[in-house]
Image: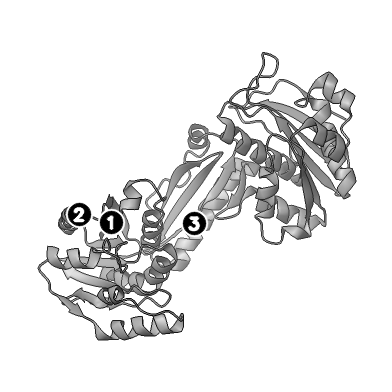
């Protein structure tokens, strides 16, 4: 079966919001072995929408439509779909009753404009929306099934899983195979190197491997097919094990497991704690760490010491050290990590200090120069890096490098510097 996803809304074409619905819908379809061949976004314009519907009917078996089901004047998806395929709009009384009940439940008076949300093309099947005011519908037209859903992600997700996927699976019948996939997260290794390292893995008719860059990481996506769910899962797990065996610790997590979550899990398993001292990252490292649910069990706190005075007063960095070596230096990075570790009484501490850009660099310390230090039970280690990116990405990769360094330390494996990073010096004590 061939599927197409159409998302509707002026705000999508103006770039006001990121269109995550396309990727979500395609990913859900893949679970039932229905492959999306086309993505399309159109304005809230009747002519553009009609053209998109007609093109989709000619080339797809399943069309998932997102957006334009609300009560306002630009919510015209249902009306245009009906007009495109010569259907009358008819009032669906159960949906009207559900709308009235919805507004009573939330304590609001229903506006007359909401009534159009109970009108659907003649011959269509209504799709319930248990958490919102906009029902969806399925319309068979010219041999293609159109599924119209709300654009609000929370409502779309619910309707897709509960209403749409079972109907699509029934239409696929015996054609569909079970499909399972995973995301393997890697850091510090480029796409071309990954391709070379993984030759011979996941390249047959049952398992395929995709590559995706999500800065500063590279994701691997093995997709396994089987006659049954159990068979697909078995093939997927075998592919994941083969990849992890080949790449070792360069694979740091699976699926939604972020670098900070992995570090937190390792610390929790050991009963150890972490603190951070940040200059160039300005709280980004602490934000990443505290985004992990349950971080309070292993993260005690952090200090954003951007100015030299803050480094002196909050972390105990000597003024003479700052004057002699500068804030972006090995001694200061060490002193920052040791200072926050001592003050908060943690097992481990990370510090960051650098020149993120776009200016502030010198011949000796160009833009992108960063020192990261890790203080722990066996002493303090500091390394410098020169990152070749813009200000925001330099900060992002600094955080990822610091977390990966601690992860590798906790695992007892050597730290590796990505090939795209220049390092000029290293010290240990």
Work out which quarter of the rendered image holds the N terminus and state it. Answer: bottom left
Residue beneath disc 2: 52
Mark nearer the N terminus (3 vs 1): 1
Q: Secondary structure at mark 2?
A: helix
Identify the coloring.
one colour
Q: Nearer the viewer, mark 3 or mark 1?
A: 1
**How far is the residue under mark 2 from the one under mark 1?**
8 Å
What residue is shown at x 40% (from left), y 48% (from top)?
16
Contact? badges 2 and 1 (CB < 8 Å): yes
The local crowd at label 1, few if under 14, some if 14 to 19, many if 20 or more residues have their Cα within 10 Å, is: many
What residue is shown at x 49% (from left), y 62% (from top)?
233
Mark nearer the N terminus (2 vs 3): 2
Where residue 367 sits, quadrant-wise, is top right
Where does residue 401 sit, x and y in percent of width and height?
Answer: 67, 37
Left or right, 244 with reference to 364: left
Where does residue 82 sit, x and y in percent of width and height?
Answer: 16, 68
């Amino acid at each position: 079966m061939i599927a197409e996803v159409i998302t509707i809304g002026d705000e999508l074409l103006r770039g006001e919001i990121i269109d995550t619905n396309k990727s979500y819908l395609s990913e859900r379809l893949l679970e039932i072995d229905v492959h999306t061949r086309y993505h399309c976004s159109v304005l809230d314009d009747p002519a553009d929408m009609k053209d998109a519907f007609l093109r989709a009917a000619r080339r797809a078996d399943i069309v998932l439509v997102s957006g334009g089901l609300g009560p306002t004047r630009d919510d015209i998806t249902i009306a245009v779909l009906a007009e495109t395929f010569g259907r009358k709009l008819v009032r669906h009384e159960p949906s009207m009753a559900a709308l009235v009940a919805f507004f009573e439940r939330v304590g609001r008076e229903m506006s007359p404009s909401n009534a159009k949300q109970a009108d659907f093309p003649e011959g269509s099947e209504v799709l319930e929306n248990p958490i919102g005011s906009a029902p969806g519908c399925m319309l068979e037209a010219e041999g293609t099934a159109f599924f119209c859903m709300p654009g609000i992600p929370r409502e779309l997700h619910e309707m897709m899983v509960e209403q749409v996927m079972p109907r699509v699976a029934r239409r696929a019948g015996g054609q569909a195979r079970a499909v399972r996939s995973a995301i393997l997260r890697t850091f510090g290794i480029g796409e071309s190197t990954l391709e070379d390292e993984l030759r011979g893995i996941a390249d047959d008719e049952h398992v395929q491997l995709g590559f995706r860059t999500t800065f500063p990481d590279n994701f691997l996506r093995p997709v396994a097919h089987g006659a049954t769910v159990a068979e697909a899962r078995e093939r997927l797990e075998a592919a994941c094990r083969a990849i992890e065996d080949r790449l070792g610790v360069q694979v740091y997590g699976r699926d939604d497991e972020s670098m900070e979550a992995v570090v937190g899990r390792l610390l929790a398993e050991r009963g150890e704690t972490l603190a951070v001292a940040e200059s160039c990252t300005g709280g980004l490292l602490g934000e990443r760490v505290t985004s992990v649910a349950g971080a309070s069990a292993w993260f005690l706190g952090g200090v954003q010491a951007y100015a030299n005075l803050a480094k002196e007063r909050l972390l105990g960095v000597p003024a003479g050290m700052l004057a002699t070596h500068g804030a972006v230096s090995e001694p200061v990075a060490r002193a920052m990590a040791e200072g926050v570790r001592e003050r908060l009484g943690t097992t481990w501490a990370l510090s960051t200090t650098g020149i993120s850009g776009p200016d502030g660099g010198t011949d000796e310390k160009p833009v992108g120069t960063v020192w990261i230090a890790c203080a722990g039970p066996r002493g303090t280690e500091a390394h410098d890096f020169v990152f070749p990116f813009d200000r925001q990405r330099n900060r992002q990769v600094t955080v990822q490098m610091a977390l990966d360094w601690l992860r590798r330390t906790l695992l007892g494996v050597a730290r590796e510097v990505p090939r795209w990073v220049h390092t000029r010096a290293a010290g240990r004590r």
